[in-house]
Image (cartoon, coloured by chain):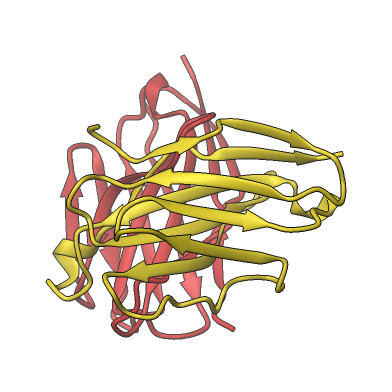
Amino acid sequence: GQQLNQSPQSMFIQEGEDVSMNCTSSSIFNTWLWYKQDPGEGPVLLIALYKAGELTSNGRLTAQFGITRKDSFLNISASIPSDVGIYFCAGRSGNTGKLIFGQGTTLQVKP
Amino acid sequence: GAGVSQSPSNKVTEKGKDVELRCDPISGHTALYWYRQSLGQGLEFLIYFQGNSAPDKSGLPSDRFSAERTGGSVSTLTIQRTQQEDSAVYLCASSLSLAGGPVYNEQFFGPGTRLTVL
């Protein structure tokens, strides 16, 4: 079945630093999504990407849909303490509602 | 309500018992999804409903798991004869539609039900 490999598994950074995480897939997706999950809550959508090569920003967040349609990255610039949480990539193929999720990247920010 | 709601927020049960988890989607959303999240893991797709179409049950791990959606709104996920490996957070999500194109089918998640099987 389809699998997503997300890296790194965890990051511990200083406030103000930039962060980068990525996902790779064994198969092609037509949509890539990035979610953030805080403890005790469901994931919240950060950025959605619909076209290969697409580069999209949302404030300090920037994400790209890889040209091969098998990968995506998320960058966070000038991190702040509230960026702490678990970040998940997710992909969708075809016209299905089913999302395939990565294993998550746990981000900790030191003030 | 403004968002997806789920109940109960926590459920502790004994091995072998049946449990029912409830999801109230965002009003007007025609698609509803169930996922399972084990400790420290990503989300695992279980099942989704789209309007009156037959549900996609391809993610259900065994025949002990079933789900229904009554009246196109509220959904119940039932786990029969629970096992310890069923312990996880069960998340529900809803979206406007699949037919409306990608922008319309982004999923909004509820807070989840944490299930613990002793």
Question: How many numbered marks appear?
Answer: 0
Instruction: Give the quarter of the figure containing the C terminus of chain B.
Output: top right
x%, y% of residue A8? 57, 52
Residue in the picture at 87% in, 47% down: B15
x%, y% of residue A77? 30, 37
Residue in the picture at 60% in, 42% down: A10
x%, y% of residue A30? 29, 79
- Does residue A35 appear anywhere in the picture? yes
Which of the 4 quarters of the picture holds residue B60? Answer: bottom right
Against A40, residue A24 (above or below) is: below
The shade of chain B is yellow
State the residue in front, A47 or A54: A47
Most distant residue in the front direction: B71
Compared across the picture, whether B40 is left or right of B52 comes to: right
Compared across the picture, whether B110 is left or right of B28 comes to: right
Which of the 4 quarters of the picture holds residue A98? Answer: bottom left
The shade of chain A is red
Against B87, residue A65 (above or below) is: below
Against A55, residue B110 (above or below) is: above
Against B44, residue A75 (above or below) is: above
Most distant residue in the left direction: B100
Which of the 4 quarters of the picture holds residue B62? Answer: bottom right
Residue in the picture at 32% in, 85% down: A94
Residue in the picture at 35% in, 71% down: A97
- Does residue B42 appear anywhere in the picture? no
x%, y% of residue B23? 43, 46
Compared across the picture, whether A87 is left or right of B39 comes to: left
Instruction: Give the quarter of the figure containing the N terminus of chain B.
Output: top left
Most distant residue in the top direction: A111
